[in-house]
């Protein structure tokens, strides 16, 4: 989800969402990341614990997650890119600019 926050008016408006219809296999209740990238005019989404069975009482996974990485063109309803990793977990994922990282 992406929200527009107006601090002066003290209002919050949801302006974008994705994944509600994809259910548990895509949803990440514990860790996820949604971020807009101005240089690409796109939204990057990482569903870190997608598909995992998580026991909230014990605080432990009962099965391995199958995380998704998605990129959406701004305003799009479906992803331009979707990558799914299998039987692994990660805290966060984010695009890396190699020129900025290594001075190219």
Image (cartoon, rainbow, N blue to C red):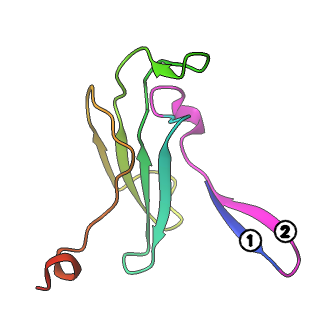
Would you say 94 lies left or right of 13 here?
left
Q: Quick check: marks 2 and 1 in contact, CB under 8 Å? A: yes
**Which residue bears the numbered disc 1?**
5
Direction front: furthest residue: 58
Q: Secondary structure at mark 1?
A: strand
Q: Hey, which quadrant is residue 58 in on the image?
A: top right
Q: Residue at x 79, y 76 (%)?
A: 6
Q: Residue at x 52, y 26 (%)?
A: 24
Q: Position of residue 10 (x, y in %)?
A: 87, 72
Compare residues 20 and 56 and report the one nearer the observer.
56
Compare residues 92 and 80 and report the one nearer the observer.
92
Compare residues 76 and 47 and report the one nearer the observer.
47
For marks 2 and 1, give the CA distance: 6 Å
Compare residues 40 and 48 and report the one nearer the observer.
48
Q: Position of residue 78 (x, y in %)?
A: 45, 51
Q: Residue at x 56, y 34 (%)?
A: 29
Direction left: furthest residue: 104
Q: Hey, which quadrant is residue 9 in on the image?
A: bottom right
Q: Position of residue 36 (x, y in %)?
A: 48, 68
């Amino acid at each position: 989800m992406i929200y527009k926050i107006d601090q002066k008016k003290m209002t919050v408006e949801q302006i974008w969402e994705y994944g509600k219809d994809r259910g548990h296999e895509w949803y990440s209740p514990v860790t996820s990341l949604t971020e807009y990238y101005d240089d690409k005019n796109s939204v990057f989404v990482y569903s870190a614990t997608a598909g995992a069975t998580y026991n909230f009482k014990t605080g432990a996974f009962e099965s391995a997650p199958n995380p998704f990485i998605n990129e959406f063109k701004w305003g799009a309803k479906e992803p331009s890119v979707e990558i799914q990793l299998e039987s692994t977990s990660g805290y966060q994922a984010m695009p890396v600019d190699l020129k900025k990282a290594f001075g190219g």
